[in-house]
Each structure stands twice: as structure tokens, then as C-alpha cells.
Amino acid sequence: MSTMFVEPEERVALRESVARLAGKYGHEYVEKQAREGGKMTEMWLEMGRSGFLGVNIAEEHGGGGGGMADLAAVLEESAAAGAPLLMMVVSPAICGSIISRCGTPEQKERWLPGIADGTHLMAFGITEADAGSNSHNITTAATRDGDHYVLSGQKTYISGVDEAQSVLVVARMKDAASGKLRPALFVVPTDAPGFTKQVIPMAWQAPEKQFTLFLDEVRVPATSLVGDPHSEDGGMWQLFAGLNPERIMGAAFSCGMARFALGKAVAYAKERSVWRDAPIGAHQGIAHPLAKVKIELEQARLLWQKAAALYDAGDDFGAGEYANMAKYAGGEIACNATDVAVHTHGGNGLTQEYGLANMLIAARLGRIAPVSREMILNFVAMHTLGLPKSY
Ligand SMILES: Cc1cc2nc3c(=O)[nH]c(=O)nc-3n(C[C@H](O)[C@H](O)[C@H](O)COP(=O)(O)OP(=O)(O)OC[C@H]3O[C@@H](n4cnc5c(N)ncnc54)[C@H](O)[C@@H]3O)c2cc1C
């Protein structure tokens, strides 16, 4: 059978090892950390020491030498165990991929080993309040000053800045020849003078916090610029090197969360009985929505596995199309699965004790970030179906 439909033995074994480690922590650990203002650090570092955070990074830089399909499997398993590591989407997937593909040998040497073992957490900042989904409109500016760059601007909804040692910031820089503004990526230490952050109070109870960032003439050495903003494609490729991994990981995160919610709901439907001696799962009104979730979950998983296989094969264009579709399907199934799981639990679904109500919000994230459902529909309508651009 084609390996497209059956994962290689090593990935199956990787999944089992991650499930065991993440299962030791589980949903209770996440809820406790969120409630008490704690972090996922203990689990994060154990995952790093075990080689799971860096599976996609080259062996010569301290990683496992695997691909995005391996990293996404790790995230799906940790989410399915009830303990998703949100920062995996950002640090090893976006930042690790961009530095691996576009960084200089010195930059790889400097940052990849720490990203791989989890001791250097790198956040990623592109979103700005006034640009939103239209990232062509970002205004954070970088200007050259001798052997430094000076960055000024604001970012919003940047995850995990309080835990991060640095942020890969997407700025814009003027091309000397054409005068055009081009995206340029800089690794900015979180303790740099002029770099400040403000927490955004979110309704979602999670150990990972979201921040608004202020960059007030932050000076970074010229060696902090990752990739070449003057390349032929206007500096876009180093950005895209990170965006497909981000979408694949978003999809895997959502699928893992859906697996967790479905597992809880099925267990409850088998054991809860309120009519005669039959469990509520004997009623089709309960069983069919659960079966539907299972089918749609497997569809979404196939999509991210295909997107990851294309990415790992070096087909960035094909990966882009499938990573978008996978992210869409993931967001939908995470929302549907958590909704059905809450409903299966009746009133218990809305209690803190059962831990499902907070997941309704977490699942909703998959429809909004890193790219919204509508922007994916725009992409598929235009690029896959050849319809006119609508925005
Ligand atoms: C919990 C969380 C974590 C995040 N982490 C990060 C991070 O680490 N780094 C980072 O850079 N960003 C991060 N983000 C930001 C995220 O990527 C953005 O929220 C997302 O891109 C949407 O942008 P926006 O919120 O400004 O929505 P807007 O762009 O204001 O969109 C609002 C609504 O309008 C719709 N819309 C907009 N344009 C169109 C159109 N042309 N056609 C149809 N509908 C449209 C959208 O789909 C959406 O429903 C995070 C966000 C959240 C909520």
C-alpha cells in the first residue's frame, strides 16, 4: 500500500512514545498550569530532551533529521493526550523551518540546537492591529544603521513572548534600488532595549499567553537578518518557508484536540445511562454526531498528512494548497468535535470539572489563526479554482 495512507513504522513508534510522555502530563496538568498561572515548561523541556521538539531539524544541528510530517505527528499526539504544545507551531515549525532553509551557517549553528532541544524558545511576530489578515499592510520598519538594523513598530496577538528568548519579527525594509518595501525577518532577543510587551487578557484559559509588542528603535546586529529581502521574489520566499509548516501544524493541533474531545465523548456515551439500562450512546441522536466527527476527523488528518508529505518532498506550491485546505478542515473538525463532546456530556459539558467548555474556545482558534477560514476560502477560490480575486 502507498506510504501516503500508511505511516512509516518509525513515525508510528514516534507517535507511541509521544503519547506516553504527553499522557503522563495530560489535560489535568494543562488545566492546573492555566488556573495557577503556570507554564508548560516541564513538559516542553522533557519533550525537547526526548528529541520530540526537534524531529524536523537536521541532525547536524541537534535535531532528529525528519520532516514536517514527523513534527506534526508529535503535536497531534500531544494534543490527543490533552496536552497540546501551542509553541511547537511557532518555535520548531515556523522559526526552525525558516532558519533551516534560509539562515546562514552561523545562524543555524546559533539557534537551531536550542530550538531543537527546547532550551531556546523563539516566538514569531507578523500580525499587526491595523493590518490584520492583510499582512501586506504591516508597517513595522527596519532601517540599516552601520552594522546594525533599527526596528520600530507594533505587533499584536503574539504567542508566548513571556516564555521566549527571542521573537522572529517580520518587518519591512526599503529596497535601495526600487524604493519598494519588502518583508524582512529579524531575530530579536526579548530582553533587547526598546522591546516591551503587554499581555492581552483572553477568554481562553491557557498556560500560553498572547501579547502586544512594542518595538521602539530596537537595535539588532546585522547578523540578525534571516534570509535575503532583496531576492528576486521580493523577499517572500523566506516568509513562505515558515507559513506552510505553520498551517500544517495548526491542522495537526486541531486534529489532536478533536481526537481528545471525541475520546472523552465516546467514553461518556458508553457509560452514562438515563433511560432503561441502555447507555446514551445507544441513541442515534448521540451516536450519529460522534460517528460524523470520526469521519470528518479522518478526512482532516489525511489532508494534513498529504500537505506534510508534499512539503517534505520539496513541493512548496503543492504543499501550500494542501496546507491551506488541511488548516480549514482542522479548524472545522476541532470546533465540531468539541461542540459534540460538550453536548454529549449534557450539563457536565459546561462544568470546569470535565474540562471541555474551555476547549470550545481553544478549538475556535483553529478557525481564526494563523490564517482565517475566509482567507483560506479566498485562496482556494482564486488559486485552486481560478476564480477572480475577491479582495
Ligand atoms: C490565540 C491567538 C494566537 C495568535 N498567535 C499569533 C502569533 O504567535 N504570531 C502572529 O503573528 N499572530 C498570531 N495571531 C494572530 C492571528 O494570526 C490573526 O488573529 C489572524 O491572522 C486574523 O487576523 P485578525 O485577528 O486581525 O482578523 P481580521 O483580519 O480583522 O479579520 C476579522 C474577520 O474578517 C474576515 N476577513 C478579513 N478579510 C477578509 C476577506 N478578504 N474576505 C473575507 N473575510 C475576511 C476574517 O476571516 C475574520 O473572520 C494569534 C491570534 C490568536 C487569536
Image (cartoon, grey):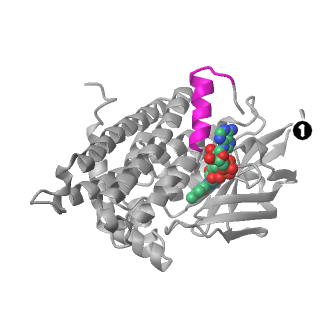
Name, please, the residue furthest toward the top. Answer: 386
Q: Secondary structure at mark 1?
A: loop
Q: Which residue is mark 1?
A: 176
Q: Residue at x 34, y 29 (%)?
A: 4
Residue lying at 44% horizontally and 55% vertically, measured from the top left: 53
Q: Nearer the viewer, residue 164 or 357?
A: 357
Residue 385 left/right relative to 268:
right
Q: How dense is the environment of label 1, judged by Cα within 10 Å: few (below 14), some, or many (20 and up)?
A: few
Give x and y (percent) for residue 146.
87, 54
Tell me the kind of residue under disc 1: Ala
Residue furthest out toward the left: 277
Q: Is residue 386 magenta?
A: yes
Q: Residue furthest bottom?
A: 36
Specify the principal SS of the magenta part: helix
* Residue 54 percent coordinates (x, y): 45, 52
- Can the viewer see residue 113? no
Q: Say left or right for 13 vs 152.
A: left
Asked if 185 appears above or below 1 in the picture, the reply is below
Is the residue indicated by label 1 positioned so its CB lies within 8 Å of ligand 1?
no
- Asked whether residue 165 is drawn in magenta, I would say no
Q: Residue at x 20, y 56 (%)?
A: 280
Quadrant, the C terminus: top right
- Which residue occupies the foreground of this view, 43 or 330? 330
Q: Position of residue 242 (x, y in %)?
A: 59, 43
Residue 8 can be seen in this image: yes
Q: Which residues are the magenta region? A: 372-388
Whole-percent x and y of residue 229?
76, 39
